[in-house]
Image (spheres, helix red, strand yellow):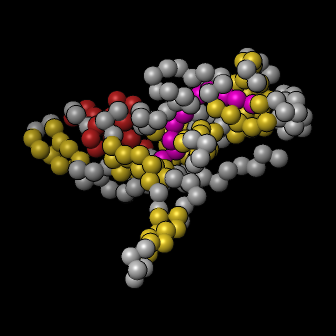
């Protein structure tokens, strides 16, 4: 298996339906009270992209993309149009959108991440597939235009010189979701001549091992 650094067609992805999924085990006691346990520390996104197929050309594009990925075998990028920016979806990323960490004078590498929720209950999502050319970085409130790089296949930002002690490292970016097809077959329905449909095409987010920073 491999990961193909290509993106699922954006025009079809715009019509997708889906989002984050959690797995919670719930046991109802005899008293009616519940015991709940979260099995996953991180959410996993799922999408049905069949809703984005509107023309015969779209159908052909999905079939071709599916064949090139060998069904479920190879992963690829997917743009979730409801959540693909570090800040508000209505504006371009700012270099101070998300806090990546605090400098200690030694560490030069920081993961891209996006924070959801509020101070009472926040969830930090690790971003592994930033969009090339979209990442902006700041130390404190000052944007850094040089002396750093980002790996588009891991989302790790590397500074030439370690940020100083107590300096906040921040970043803004666009990102894709690493996914794969959830089936090895596409059930295409030929409705009329030169037009067809697929009842369901599910994509699931890939759980990837995170590389060590040090």
The segment highlighted magenta reads: 169-180
Q: Residue at x 41, y 33 (%)?
A: 81
Q: Position of residue 92 (x, y in %)?
A: 53, 20
User: Horizontally, is 208 left or right of 65 in the view?
Assistant: right
**Which of the pair 182/138 is nearer the observer?**
138
Q: Main secondary structure of the magenta part?
A: strand
**Which of the pair 124/16 is nearer the observer?**
124
Asked if residue 175 can be seen in this view, the reply is yes
Q: Position of residue 61 (x, y in %)?
A: 32, 36
Q: Residue at x 75, y 31 (%)?
A: 169
Q: Position of residue 152 (x, y in %)?
A: 63, 34
Q: Residue at x 33, y 47 (%)?
A: 48
Snapshot quadrant of residue 194: top left
**Which of the pair 202/83 is nearer the observer?**
83
**Rendered-image quadrant of the N terminus:** bottom right
User: Horizontally, is 23 left or right of 194 in the view?
Assistant: right
Query: Which residue lies most toward the front here?
Result: 31
Residue 175 part of the magenta segment: yes
Q: Residue at x 61, y 42 (%)?
A: 119
**Which of the pair 201/100 is nearer the observer?**
100
Snapshot quadrant of residue 100: top right
Please say if 149 is above or below 60.
above
Residue 184 part of the magenta segment: no
């Amino acid at each position: 298996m491999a990961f193909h650094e290509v993106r699922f067609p954006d025009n079809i992805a715009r019509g997708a339906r889906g989002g984050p999924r959690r797995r919670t085990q719930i046991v109802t006691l005899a008293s009616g009270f519940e015991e709940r346990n979260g099995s996953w520390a991180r959410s996993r996104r799922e999408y049905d992209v069949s809703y984005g197929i509107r023309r015969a050309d779209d159908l052909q594009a999905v079939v071709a993309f599916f064949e090139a990925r060998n069904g479920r075998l190879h992963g690829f990028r997917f743009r979730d149009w409801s959540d693909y920016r570090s800040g508000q979806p209505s504006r371009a990323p700012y270099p101070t959108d998300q806090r990546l960490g605090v400098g200690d004078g030694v560490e030069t590498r920081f993961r891209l991440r996006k924070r959801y929720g509020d101070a009472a209950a926040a969830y930090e999502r690790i971003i592994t597939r930033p969009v090339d050319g979209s990442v902006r970085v700041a130390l404190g409130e000052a944007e850094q235009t040089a002396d750093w790089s980002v790996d588009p296949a891991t989302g790790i930002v590397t500074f030439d010189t370690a940020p100083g002690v107590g300096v906040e490292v921040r970043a803004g970016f666009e990102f894709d979701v690493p996914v794969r097809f959830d089936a090895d077959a596409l059930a295409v329905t030929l409705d009329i001549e030169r037009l067809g449909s697929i009842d369901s095409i599910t994509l699931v987010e890939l759980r990837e091992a995170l590389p060590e920073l040090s």
